[in-house]
Amino acid sequence: MSEILILASVKLHEYDLPIIADYYFEVGERLSTVGGCYGLSVWRDPDEVESFLVAYEYADLEAAERGLVAISEVRLLAETQLADFRPANVWRVRIHSRSAKHVNQAPQTACLSMSVRVADPGYGPELLDELGRIFDELQYIPGFLGSVYGTNDALDEEVIALATWVDVAAFRSSLPRTAGPRKLQMYTRFF
């Protein structure tokens, strides 16, 4: 049975930013009682300050389901928001490979890069192999903390990959010097 990573991309109105840390602290407290939950972390888009990525990490699908039940016992973020509610975009990822630490173990100064790529039908395994080679090389770059990647539970050809870095400078040093399309989203640690 593979590990599960739940990712939620959330946009909050600026009026609601003060409540996010309290809300996710309470969620984290609740998840700490769930067997098989490795923890959660909250990341912020430095270019779009109302955009956040929340990563929930679990040992397996059953633990993820228990985590969802535990989270449902916490007052919904939407119920506490002062301004407009915007639903989250959620991915459930079956982990194919992980190197080093869990995402939630990254230090407060850390940076996270995220890539969502879709292979042609039937070519998901090849895309996973390609990402494996990329992450094998990234581990030698100073400031690289770890990586995790896998497939979207709802679409085998969609591969989601995360890499954590000591800071933004380390992440930027990993980018190729040549110009070209980059499908990477960067976040800094919020909680």
Image (cartoon, grey):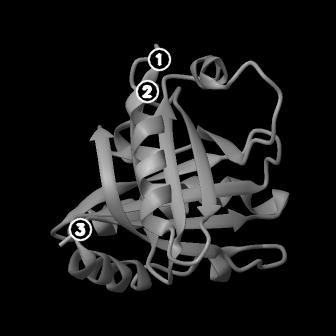
Vertical side of 137 occupied by 13: above or below: below
Front residue of 92/86: it is: 92
Q: Quadrant of residue 60?
A: bottom left
User: Which picture quadrant has residue 150?
Assistant: bottom left
For label 2, the crowd category at 10 Å Cα-Cα, with few meaning under 14, some 14 to 19 and many 20 or more, is few
Tag 3 or tag 1, which sits nearer the N-term? 3
Secondary element under disc 1, as helix, strand or loop, is: loop
Considering the image in quadrants, where does the N terminus appear? bottom left
Read off the residue under disc 1.
141
Identified at 42% across, 64% down, the residue is 125
- x and y percent of residue 110 in the render? 52, 30
Drawn side of residue 149 relative to residue 58, left or right: right
Residue 137 image label: 2
Task: Provide residue 168's location: percent of width, then percent of height.
Answer: 63, 24
Instruction: Estimate the spatial distance between the alpha carbons at disc 1 and disc 3, rounded to whole Å.
Output: 27 Å
Residue with the mark numbered 3? 2
Image coords of residue 52 (percent x, y): 66, 55
Check disc 1: other Cα within 10 Å, few if <14, some if 14-19, many if 20+. Answer: few
Residue type indicated by callout 1: Ile
Question: Disc 3 residue type?
Answer: Ser
State the CA–CA distance, disc 2 to disc 3: 24 Å
Residue shown at the point (80%, 42%) measured from the top left:
181
Element on which disc 3 rests: loop
Q: Nearer the viewer, mark 2 or mark 1?
A: 2
> For the residues carrying marks 2 and 3, which lies nearer the camera in this image?
2
